[in-house]
Amino acid sequence: MTDELRARLRALPSFPAELPAFDPAGAPPTPEELFLAWLDEAVAAGVLAPHAATLATVDATGPSARVLVLKDVGPEGWAIATPADSRPGEAMTASGAAALGFFWPALGRQVRVEGEVRRADDADAAADFGARPADARATALVGRPAPTLSGDAEYAAARADAFARVERDPDLVPDSWALWWVVPSTVEFWQAVHDRAHVRLRYRRHEGSWARERLWP
């Protein structure tokens, strides 16, 4: 890394001039309530893809992360969808754990969700898959005969075949499609402050309810 690049990175703005205030004393009793309130505020602020989350998993080869979208949230946890035979799907099956990270820079906010993973039943997975647009269903149905792709022609042919399958059977659901619940043991909310006295609040599952804890910035 060069001195010039380091200087450029340090000079990049992180957050807008005005940031919302966050008083942990007024936080609701459950993390899903606060998350949904923050999500609504992110939508109102015009944050692009406010439902996008970074899913972090680990398997025998090491850690891995990718961005996907939130499917649902409630007392059961935070729901995401990915095939059971994908790398994250296999990792969650093997480890039984995962973490989600949400970042809304326009508000200077992030949320971390960490806990065990439970696979939803097939009916819920089928309902999730059926609610996807046709092109998304076709993309999910594309076969992957090898981990690498030889070129655009191979993918175009596989995708055309998948579209044809969707047209023939609109109710088709791949056996591997899965809906997962990240059932949190902890949920952390972080609010940026320009003087760097950032506000952190952690919800920790304790004896069937939630304990709220202030964390050092």
Image (cartoon, rainbow, N blue to C red):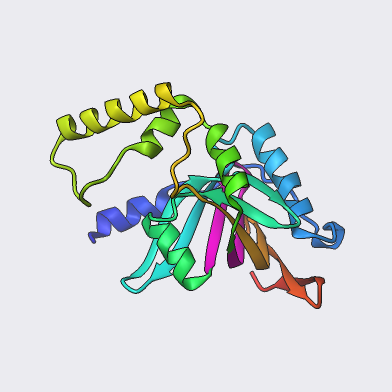
Query: What x and y, as percent, mark residue 99?
Result: 54, 63
Assign the C terminus to one quadrant of the image. bottom right
Q: Viewed as shown, does residue 53 lie left or right of 217?
A: left
Instruction: Compare residues 53 and 143 and report the one nearer the observer.
Output: 143
Residue 103 is one of the magenta-drawn residues: yes
Assign the N terminus to one quadrant of the image. bottom left
- Span highlighted in magenta in the image: 97-117
Q: Residue at x 74, y 72 (%)?
A: 205
Instruction: Compare residues 94 and 114 and report the one nearer the observer.
Output: 94
Relative to 125, residue 141 above or below: above
Q: Is residue 130 visible?
A: yes
Q: Residue at x 82, y 58 (%)?
A: 27
Query: What x and y, as percent, mark residue 61?
Result: 31, 71
Pick out the residue farthest to the top: 167
Q: Is residue 197 visible?
A: no
Query: What x and y, as percent, mark residue 15?
Result: 56, 46
